[in-house]
Amino acid sequence: MATNDIQGVDGFPEDPEDLLPPDSVLTLDEYLAMHAAVGHRTRYEVLYRLVHTGEMSPTELEAALDIDDSTLHYHLNKLVDVGLIEKRQRTERGQDGLYTYYRATVFGEVTLSDGVDELIRGEQEFAAMYDSTSEP
């Protein structure tokens, strides 16, 4: 019997590792690292901006988040390391050198929109439901 066939309580596998499909691109530890990375407020805000506004340069992110260069780059590197964002470079017309920018990966978009943002939306829906059922 394959490990993915072993069912625990409520139909879920006994071992969380068995939730992954046999041909999973990532390991459970890599998925957990992504969620841990986005659990820091600054990294969440960076990812939020990149998902909702598109690619941004470090200078644009510094201004939007009002943080210093070294702090920003520390958090950018953490997000790149776990695969939530990617660093890209290209040449800009009329400029010497490379233009560096960051953008969210598919994993970054899903982690944000189906993760933290979904929890926040769920709380908003619960609060609205609670407010509409309570008596004045």
Image: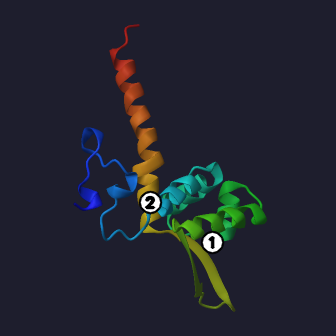
Q: Where's the C terminus, which quadrant?
A: top left
Residue 43: which quarter of the image? bottom right
Sooner in the amino-acid sequence: mark 2 or mark 1: 2
| Rendered residue at 63%/64% (across/down) | 78
From the image, tell me which residue sits under label 2: 28
Query: Looking at the image, is mark 2 or mark 1 nearer the viewer?
Result: 2
Viewer-proximal residue among 128 and 122: 122
Q: Amino acid at mark 1?
A: Ser
Q: Amino acid at mark 2?
A: Leu
| Rendered residue at 57%/72% (across/down) | 102
Residue at the extreme top: 136
Q: Does 7 appear above or below 125?
A: below
Q: Does 116 appear above or below 107?
A: above
Residue 90 vs residue 22: left or right?
right
Residue 45 vs residue 67: left or right?
left
Q: Position of residue 44 (x, y in %)?
A: 57, 53
| Rendered residue at 39%/36% (across/down) | 122
* 10 Å crowding of disc 2: few (<14), some (14-19), many (20+): some
Instruction: Name the element at disc 1.
Output: loop
Viewer-proximal residue among 47 and 40: 40
Q: Does 101 appear above or below 116?
A: below
Instruction: Name the element at disc 2.
Output: helix
CA distance separating discs 2 and 1: 31 Å
Residue 118: which quarter of the image? top left
Q: Position of residue 22 (x, y in %)?
A: 30, 67
From the image, tell me which residue sits under label 1: 57
